[in-house]
Amino acid sequence: MNGVPVVIGIVLAWAGITFPVENPRITGAFGATSGAHYNAARRHQGVDVVPYGGATGRAVLAPANGVVHRVYYSHTTGWVVVLAIQAPATFWATSLAGQVHTIAQGETFFIGLKHHQRVLVTEGQRVTSGQTIAAIGSTGSTSTGAHVHMELRIGPRWTGGYRLDPLDFFLAFIPELRPHLTARGWRGR
């Protein structure tokens, strides 16, 4: 891609990073305090996203080259795919408390994608950026409709990892994402 951000059809990609949903619309912001399952005491710990034009059964794309760290079903979050990804370059991401954390080039972090209708990958499988890894669904008791809930965690493992805003990762590597989301009503920071 020659270092130039491009819109491939309706897939946003740049430098080996792909947004996991085509033609995205943010429906639940990181740190939100109002919604069906969160409030001031329990803030939203990820970002909810749906594609324009309907969601159920649409592709969930691997955001980067990596390894499927975990695949599991949770009563609350339904089908979950967790990818272990090495940072392609240093980037910064913000915690729920507003602290900025540095993720250094080569450091491993985790991206969890939740509520899938079905999962198309297995634990230990290598995936490439843009590969279809699941189908969008509404599984789990906390789902409010077909969407993908995205989380970014740092730490030695997914369980207990420190949660950061996943949009910080995508905005660092896909500059075209910000105006694309803003045009669709996302207010961002």
Image (cartoon, rainbow, N blue to C red):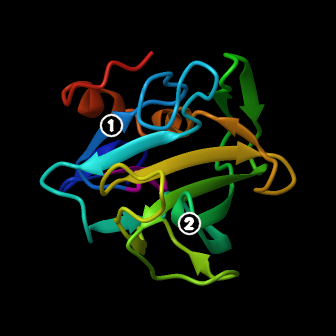
Q: What number is the disc on residue 80?
A: 2
Horizontal and vertical percent for residue 83?
Answer: 63, 64
Residue located 49% across and 35% down the image: 167
Q: Earlier in the sequence, mark 1 or mark 2?
A: 1
Which residue was labeled with disc 1? 27
Give amino acid for label 1.
Thr
- Camera-side residue: 69 or 91? 69
Residue 107 image offset from top left, x and y in percent: 79, 49
Task: Tell me the magenta residue range.
Answer: 12-20
Number of residues whose C-alpha sits closer than 10 Å to that of mark 2, classed few (under 14), some (14–19) or many (20 or more):
many
Above/below status of 47 relative to 144: above
Mark 2 lies on a secondary structure that is: strand
Q: Is residue 17 magenta?
A: yes
Q: Is residue 61 left or right of residue 80?
A: left
Tag 2: residue type?
Val
Task: Measuring from the top left, give residue 33's x and y in whole percent.
Answer: 50, 21
Residue 65, located in which quarter of the rendered image? Answer: bottom right
Mark sitting on residue 143: none
